[in-house]
Image: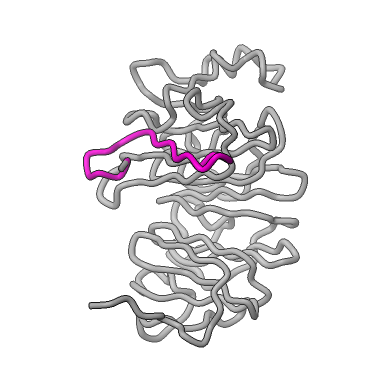
Amino acid sequence: SSLRPLLPKVRVLAVSAGAAHVLLADDQGRCWSGGDAGDGRLGRGGASELAIVEGVDDIKGVAAGACHSLAFTSKGTLYAWGLASDGRLGFTTEDASAPPTRVALEGVVDASAGKYHSLVVASEGVVFAFGDNSYGQLGLGHADDAWEPACVALPSSAVCVAAGASHSLVLLEDGDVVGFGSDAQGQLGGARVDDDESDSDSSDTDSTSSSSSSAADDEVWTPARVPGLCGKGVVAVAAGGAANSDAGHTVAVTAAGAVLCLGAGGLGQLG
């Protein structure tokens, strides 16, 4: 069958695909959702066909995770909905899932929803992380989940973020890329904090060194530069993951138009 427009009369400005649902933002600031309605990830009742999410407007960007959703407005307000476990929505709730709810962050300019965690860039390039932290994918130097946005210490200001199944990426304003979380499939390119200490703005080098991973456990607990992506003029990054495992891969695009890939490639995801 041939491709056809899903919303022929709507001008879509942003799109994000999760494990079983999709989010769109149009030129009128509306947020659309479609797909699997389980866990409240669509932010509305009704069928799985694309429809408008009520209660949010002026939407500029969207991010779809495995079972949760994020959307931010042109004024920097962040909304989250869907499965609430592990803190991936950025707020505490007694319910298993939540409708579109405002998160206590201001000045949001970018957001990414991973499998069970979330990353956000706020004003002045500050990055916040929340949700599951089993592999250190929040970059906080410990394994505790974060139920509220926690600030990630970075060597310089962030431009954008990418959250995968078990790893995270941050594109810095100088074009370098830092990563944290699982490096089990090489999705962080062998990044280690010990290799990056001279560039870190952290004064607590002892705790940073002890929280970084060894070659045996393949986990990076605080941001470390990704060797294969630094100095290459990267302008965009994406973090992928498998639906049925925590295997991950990384894709970056350079200013020259080159595509760089790292990580799991057993299904051809590295091209």
- Whether residue 154 is in magenta: the answer is no
Numbered circles on residues, count = 0
Residue at the extreme front of the image, as rendered: 256
| Nearest the eye: 221 or 154 | 154
Image coords of residue 224 (percent x, y): 55, 25
Q: Quadrant of residue 83?
A: bottom left
Q: In the shown orientation, is residue 214 left or right of residue 255? A: left
Q: Position of residue 121 (x, y in %)?
A: 65, 48
Q: Give the camera-side residue of 143 and 72.
A: 72
Residue 197 is situated, as x and y percent measured from the top left of the image, at 62, 15
Query: Quadrant of the image for the C terminus?
Result: top left
Answer left or right for 93 relative to 49.
right
User: In percent of the image, x 58 and y 65: which residue is there?
Assistant: 71
Range of residues picked out in magenta: 253-270
Q: Is residue 213 above or below residue 169?
A: above
Residue at 47% x, 69% y: name it: 23
Quarter of the figure with residue 128: top right
Q: Residue at x 61, y 80 (%)?
A: 55
